[in-house]
Every structure is written in C-alpha cells, then in structure tokens.
C-alpha cells in the first residue's frame, strides 16, 4: 500500500509538468487558459508536497 501512495505522490508532479508544458504551448494563443493551467500546476505541486509531508507523518506514527 505504501508503494501506491508514493506513485500517486509522483503522479502529481507529472501532472504539474504536463500543465506547465500546455500553458507554455498555449501562452500566445489563449492566454486565459494558459494562466488557468499554471494555477492548476501550482495546485498539483502543492498536493505533491502535502502528500509527501502527510506520508512521512503517517510513517513516523507507525
């Protein structure tokens, strides 16, 4: 079960990288969508660090 949580944690980083790539690609075409994708990328990075912190906290409690 620990492995699946680690995979999900790194999936958030992959999603953030994808959103950043799409934002760069759309920057000159649709600026509003690009900004929205950057916000989602920031949220995904935040979720990565939250999951990492929470997983370490749960491992220390066991």
Image (cartoon, helix red, strand yellow):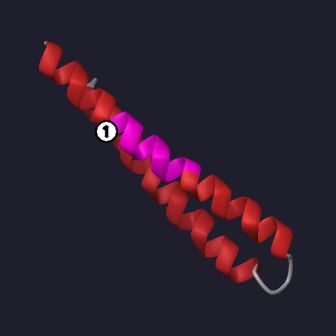
Q: Residues within 10 Å of mark 1 (few under 14, many from 20)?
A: some
The image position of residue 28, as x and y in percent, is 80, 87
20 w.r.t. 53: above or below? below
Q: Residue at x 82, y 75 (%)?
A: 31
The dominant secondary structure in magenta is helix
Q: Residue at x 85, y 83 (%)?
A: 29
The residue beneath circle 1 is 52
Q: Magenta stretch: residue 48 in it?
A: yes
45 w.r.t. 8: above or below? below
Q: Magenta stretch: residue 16 in it?
A: no
Q: Residue at x 23, y 24 (%)?
A: 57
The image position of residue 49, as x and y in percent, is 37, 44
Q: Quadrant of the C terminus?
A: top left
Q: Quadrant of the N terminus?
A: top left
Is residue 4 visible in the rendered structure shown here?
Answer: no
For residue 28, side relative to residue 13 (left or right): right
Q: Residue at x 35, y 42 (%)?
A: 7
The image position of residue 20, as x and y in percent, is 59, 69
For residue 13, side relative to residue 36 (left or right): left
Closer-to-camera residue (44/8): 44
26 w.r.t. 28: above or below? above
The image position of residue 12, as x and y in percent, is 47, 48
Q: What span is colored magenta in the figure?
A: 43-52
């Amino acid at each position: 079960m620990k492995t699946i949580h680690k995979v999900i944690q790194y999936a958030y980083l992959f999603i953030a990288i994808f959103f950043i790539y799409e934002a760069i690609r759309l920057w000159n075409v649709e600026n509003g969508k690009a900004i929205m994708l950057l916000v989602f990328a920031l949220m995904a990075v935040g979720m990565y660090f939250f999951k990492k912190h929470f997983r370490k906290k749960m491992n220390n409690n066991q």
